[in-house]
Structures are given as C-alpha cells and as structure tokens.
Amino acid sequence: MAMANQIINPILDPISPYYLSPNENPGAVLVSALLNGDNYHPWSRAMTMALQMKNKMMFVDGSLPKPEAHDQMYAVWSRCNSLVVSWITHSIQPSIVQSVLWMDITKEIWDDLKERYYQGDLFKISEIIGAMHNIKQGNATIDQF
C-alpha cells in the first residue's frame, strides 16, 4: 500500500509523455513514405499513429505546452520536444526540411506543414471527384463499360 502514495518520476514512467525508452533514436524515420508535399494526408495519418504509439502526440497537438525556462520540467520537455522535432524532420523530404529547420517547437512545425499542404490535397480530391462524375457509360452495356 505504500506504493500507492509514491510519486513516480515522469522520466521513468512508461505512460508519461516524458518517458524515453532506451532504444529511442533521434535519427529514426517513423513512416515509410517521406512527406513530399503531395502526400500530406497519408503522411500525417501515419505520423499521428506513430507518435501516438510513442505517447508523444501531446508535443504535436500542443496539449503539453512548453514550460517556463525556470520550471523544473523545462529541460525534460525540451529534450522530448527535440526528439519529436528530429523524428518529424527525418520523415520529410530534404527540400521541405529546409523550410522548418529553424523552428524549435514541434507544434509550430506540425501546424506549418498542415497549413501548407492540407489544402493542396483537398484540391486534388476535388479534381478526382469531378473526374469521376464525368465518367460516362455511353452506349456500352454495364458489362462492356
């Protein structure tokens, strides 16, 4: 029962967003297809799943904000944030990395990429839907079509 009152260090607690397993690697690529500007939606979904699995989405969605520099958790937050920034930059094409390289906060990078590439995919989806509506059967039977 003494364990119930014991405070667990967030760095050592596997359910904490501050926990880093010994095999975490800042050079890791978390998704198979790098963001290239044309694949934002599948890239974003794959990254979201990978970051959720690693319990790091709070850095991306801003629900774990940057502590003040004097806060005792600042160094821990900064280390984890830097790791997630590294994962993101290793998961996008080098030409895109250059545009976010000097951003320090994961949420800023994530929001910037979404602002730039989310709309482009919507336009492509609209074009595809329009093309689908223009497909006509003509004089062919359904089997021939």
Image (cartoon, rainbow, N blue to C red):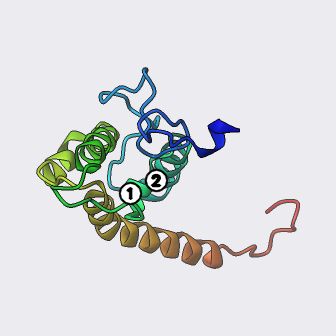
Vertical arrangement, residue 95 with respect to residue 105, above or below = above
Look at label 2 and name its amino acid: Met
Vertical arrangement, residue 44 with respect to residue 3, above or below = below
Q: Tag 2, which secondary structure? A: helix
Residue 119, position in %: x, y?
38, 73
Badge number at residue 90: none
Residue 95, position in %: x, y?
18, 45
Residue 27, position in %: x, y?
30, 27
Residue beneath disc 2: 57
The structure residue drawn at horizontal position 51% and vertical position 37%, both measured from the top left corner, is 13
Residue 14, position in %: x, y?
54, 36
130 on left or right of 96: right
> Number of labelled discs?
2
Badge number at residue 60: 1
Mark 2 touches mark 1? (CB < 8 Å): yes
Q: Quadrant of residue 136?
A: bottom right
Spatial separation of the CA atoms under disc 2 and disc 1: 5 Å
The structure residue drawn at horizontal position 41% and vertical position 36%, both measured from the top left corner, is 11
Q: Nearer the viewer, residue 118 or 68?
A: 68
Q: Tag 1, which secondary structure? A: helix
**Label 1 crowd bin: few (<14), some (14–19), many (20+), radius 10 Å:** many
The structure residue drawn at horizontal position 29% and vertical position 42%, both measured from the top left corner, is 76
Q: Quadrant of residue 64?
A: bottom left
**Label 2 crowd bin: few (<14), some (14–19), many (20+), radius 10 Å:** many
Instruction: Name, please, the residue furthest toward the front.
Output: 2
Q: Nearer the viewer, residue 20 or 85?
A: 20
